[in-house]
Amino acid sequence: MLLHDRTAIITGASRGIGKSIALTFAREGAALVLICQKDVKGLNVVKKEAELLGVKVLTLIGDVASVDFCNDIVKKTVHSFGSISILVNCAGTITRSPIEEMSNKEWHRVIDVNLHSVLYLCRNVLPVMRKQKYGKIINLTSQMAHMPHPSASPSYEVSKSGVTALTRHLAFKYAKFNICVNNIAPGSIDTDLPKSMSKEARQKLKDAVPMKRLGETAEVADCALFLASQMSSYVTGSTLHVNGGSLI
């Protein structure tokens, strides 16, 4: 197993990409600390599926935009498992308001969830990883960090661009401690939002992708597995684009 004896914290783990990453890591032997804010039912489903694969699972419910909750995540992980091998920052939120209609509250909420939570969790796991001279941090950004989107609020693009820059900074600073920090930037992935679209809207989304299809959450999870395992031991400060060629 590629992740045997590893412990992974995964935020946004109750559905979509986070769920796929959690179950992929479980199949490879990782103990899991799964985080979500509200979807307790969904998180418990993921927990049960992972436990059936023979791994230990701790679930925590809370808002990753809270610095106190992020501190608590790391403390409880170390208390329960003794170490932290992998951190996957997958939790995120998006709004659609144009800049002239977007409230300050809306702006700050997106930045808090998408960017500040990454800072809080990275800042807390890095001392643990530095002490053990090993760690893998994977931050989920977006292709919208590299190109504008016609219907997303600017806060989303700014937050994901900030994560991309933070990842590079941490990769540079902590490479000497054998800590690899990388991004995954998904494009159009077939999560809840595309599944809820009309047939026409889904087809329009597919037509905009050179491969003429939406990505699967499992395809993102496989990339996360690569970055979480020893297969990527010489990869840090990179962004892995998973978008069917949308940035070509």
Image: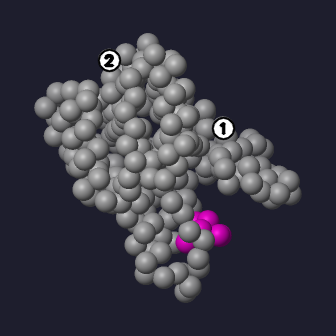
Question: Where residue 227 sits in the image (x, y, percent)?
Answer: 42, 31
Q: Is residue 196 magenta?
A: no
Task: Name the disc covering residue 5, or none.
Answer: 2
Given the current orientation, which residue lies at the most extreme right position?
200
Q: Please give the name of the residue rendered at 49% of the width and 53% of the height, measured from the top-left corner.
A: 38
Q: Main secondary structure of the magenta part?
A: loop
Against 122, residue 225 (above or below) is above
Q: Nearer the viewer, mark 2 or mark 1?
A: 2
Horizontally, residue 236 falls left or right of residue 159, namely left
Horizontally, residue 212 falls left or right of residue 14, namely right
Disc 2 + disc 1, Cβ < 8 Å:
no
What amino acid type should be assigned to the residue bearing mark 1?
Glu
How far apart are labels 2 and 1 at the CA level? 27 Å
Location of residue 5 by image quarter:
top left
Q: Which residues are magenta?
A: 148-153
The secondary element bearing badge 2 is classed as: loop
Q: Is residue 152 magenta?
A: yes
Given the current orientation, which residue lies at the most extreme top position?
1
Question: Where residue 44 sits in the image (x, y, percent)?
Answer: 51, 37
Foreground of the two, 220 or 67 = 67
Foreground of the two, 86 or 38 = 38
Q: How many marks?
A: 2
Horizontally, residue 230 falls left or right of residue 150, namely left
Given the current orientation, which residue lies at the most extreme left position?
131
Say which residue label 1 marks: 216
Q: Please give the name of the residue rendered at 40% of the width and 38% of the height, measured from the top-left corner.
A: 59
What amino acid type should be assigned to the residue bearing mark 2?
Asp
The secondary element bearing badge 1 is classed as: loop
Foreground of the two, 245 or 60 = 60
Q: Give the mark, 2 or 1, whose residue is nearer the N terminus.
A: 2
